[in-house]
Image (spheres, helix red, strand yellow):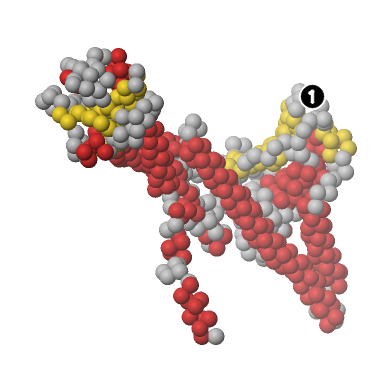
């Protein structure tokens, strides 16, 4: 077992780790891989080109040398011959070497019938031909006189290209040295090598610089992507906003610069795509945060609704239980008629609160009211007359500005409840003598109801929440009398009924002027889009006194809480 373990340890590559694998060519960046690939490609191209040039030039030079050797041999066969004692057929006829124009190093030799050299001479630098020695002649033996070319190395003279031709029984061998051709080829190889090295070095440097410059936009895009990946996108969820601090803004993610989003380049396309992706991420984060904020607000409203509803219900139940206890103790504790009257009043109050809550629940579930044709002018007039009968200490005015009949499709009873709630709200939270003007406007597209008074106005801090449920200026739930305020559901019910009819409700308030506006679509027109219709002045102005009445006595601050539909 130990020998096998040692064998496995020996076969395992030494020093091979994840860090070494990360340095492998696959882990290198484009900045290093592209120049390396370009240099390797250039080396292969240069090598192939140099080899091709070398082979072509070598073949050309050797062919030219062979042609010159052949031409010399043919010229020798057709030239004059010298005569010696042996007569004109002597095999030492090498007179052509004495002619002018012979190249330095030219060899001439005569061959016998067996192919051996009988005489041989060479043209030296001084131009006076000299005889070859036996060793040099032996290097030229064995060449047939058929005109074929041969390469022979002659001792002391170098490598030669030789051929032999026979004419009239005379075989003459001629040859030219190859040293010039070899020197030229060697010089060509050296020049090609130097040029290739210098060219590859220059090309490699230029490619490295160009590639790095061209990859800079991609590097900036990658840096932006890394920065986005390091952003703590989940912190908004971990450190969510509180009602006091307000919503936490969505973190602004880094963007790729405009110069790196050119659609004409691949890096620019990547940068533009990354920016679009970041926009989508931010939109998703903003949408998620808005959803979370809405959920938090809904949960907060639900908690407040449960707390307020439980307390509002507990108050009349406690009163009923108290009166019942007094009646149980005997008739001397309280007059039975008064006790039953108070029990009936608290029961009616509790019933009205439960009915208001049930109405809001039905509207939240999307259960639209009964729809029929309703005349806003008639129901507003009825509501104003009812308010005048209930609160004769206010100045109630009605204005009808009708270009067309003020007909809408909806539940007439619920629409009457909306107007009655607004008028009751004005009656309960404005001082005696306040003028309340109710007007109806009708156009081809919409119907508008306005309820305006010149009371003290709604506090700016309360104005953004005026249509929320159980919203009151006085946060306490104790009300000593009927004019101290309602449950805080009146305006919430008015807003819910208006929205259920496809309309919208808004309020503008400042000291001396408060106006509620109800907009409803005409019959056959689409629903109205909700807008921000709650506004208040930036700086409060002094409250002007009513123009037709003496300065009113101090009154409680106006609050948007009223009873819902029961006006006794």
- Relative placement, left or right, of 207 versus 372 is left
Give the quadrant of residue 306.
bottom right
Helix, strand or loop for disc 1: loop
- Residue at screen point 76% across, 73% down: 318
Question: What is the x, y in percent for residue 390?
Answer: 77, 48
Where the N terminus falls, by quadrant?
bottom right
- Residue at screen point 81% across, 57% down: 358
Identify the residue position indicated by label 1 in the image.
Answer: 404
Crowdedness of circle 1 by 10 Å Cα count: few (<14), some, many (20+)?
A: few
Question: What is the x, y in percent for residue 210?
Answer: 36, 37
- Residue at screen point 62% across, 56% down: 292
Q: Is residue 175 above or below residue 434?
A: above
Give the quadrant of residue 69.
top left
- Residue at screen point 53% across, 81% down: 4
Q: Is residue 126 above or below residue 247?
A: above
Disc tally is 1
């Amino acid at each position: 077992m130990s020998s096998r373990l040692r064998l496995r340890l020996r076969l395992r590559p030494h020093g091979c780790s994840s860090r070494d694998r990360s340095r492998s060519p696959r882990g290198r960046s484009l900045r290093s891989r592209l120049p390396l690939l370009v240099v390797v490609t250039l080396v292969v191209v240069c090598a192939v080109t140099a080899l091709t040039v070398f082979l072509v030039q070598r073949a050309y030079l050797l062919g030219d040398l062979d042609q010159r050797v052949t031409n010399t041999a043919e010229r020798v066969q057709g030239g004059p011959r010298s005569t010696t004692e042996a007569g004109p057929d002597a095999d030492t006829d090498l007179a052509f070497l004495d002619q002018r124009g012979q190249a330095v190093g030219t060899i001439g030799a005569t061959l016998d019938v067996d192919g051996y050299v009988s005489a041989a001479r060479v043209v030296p630098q001084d131009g006076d031909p000299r005889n070859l020695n036996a060793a040099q002649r032996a290097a030229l033996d064995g060449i047939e006189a058929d005109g074929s070319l041969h390469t022979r190395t002659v001792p002391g003279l170098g490598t030669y290209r030789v051929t032999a031709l026979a004419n009239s029984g005379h075989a003459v061998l001629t040859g030219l040295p190859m040293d010039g051709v070899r020197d030229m080829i060697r010089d060509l190889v050296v020049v090609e090598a130097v040029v290739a090295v210098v060219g590859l070095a220059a090309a490699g440097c230029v490619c490295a610089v160009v590639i790095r410059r061209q990859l800079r936009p991609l590097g900036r895009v990658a840096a932006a992507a890394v920065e986005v990946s390091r952003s703590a996108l989940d912190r908004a969820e971990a450190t969510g906003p509180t009602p006091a601090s307000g919503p936490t803004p969505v973190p602004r993610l880094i963007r790729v610069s405009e110069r790196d989003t050119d659609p004409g380049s691949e890096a620019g396309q990547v940068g533009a795509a990354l920016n679009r992706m970041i926009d989508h991420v931010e939109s998703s984060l903003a949408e998620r945060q808005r959803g979370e904020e809405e959920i938090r607000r809904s949960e907060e409203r639900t908690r407040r609704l449960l707390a307020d509803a439980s307390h509002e219900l507990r108050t009349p139940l406690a009163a009923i239980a108290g009166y019942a206890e007094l009646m149980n103790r005997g008739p001397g504790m309280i007059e039975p008629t008064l006790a039953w009257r108070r029990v009936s009043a608290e029961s009616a109050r509790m019933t009205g609160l439960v009915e208001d809550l049930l109405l809001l629940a039905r509207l939240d579930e999307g259960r639209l009211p009964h729809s029929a044709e309703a005349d806003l002018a008639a129901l507003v007039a009825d509501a104003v007359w009812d308010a005048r009968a209930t609160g004769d200490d206010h100045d109630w005015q009605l204005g009808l500005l009708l270009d067309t009949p003020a007909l809408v499709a909806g539940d007439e009873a619920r629409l009457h409840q909306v107007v009655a709630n607004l008028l009751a709200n004005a009656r309960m939270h404005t001082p005696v003598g306040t003028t309340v003007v109710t007007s109806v406007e009708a156009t081809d597209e919409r119907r508008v109801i306005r309820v305006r008074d010149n009371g003290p106005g709604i506090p700016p801090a309360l104005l953004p929440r005026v249509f929320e449920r159980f919203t009151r200026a006085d946060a306490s739930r104790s009300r000593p009398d009927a004019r101290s305020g309602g449950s805080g559901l009146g305006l919430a019910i008015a807003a819910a009924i208006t929205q259920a009819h496809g309309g919208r409700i808004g309020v503008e308030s400042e000291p001396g002027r408060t106006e509620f506006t109800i907009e409803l679509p005409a019959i056959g027109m689409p629903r109205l889009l909700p807008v921000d219709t709650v506004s208040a002045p930036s700086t409060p102005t002094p409250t002007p006194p009513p123009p037709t009445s003496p300065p009113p006595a101090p009154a409680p601050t106006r609050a948007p809480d009223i009873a819902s539909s029961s006006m006794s």
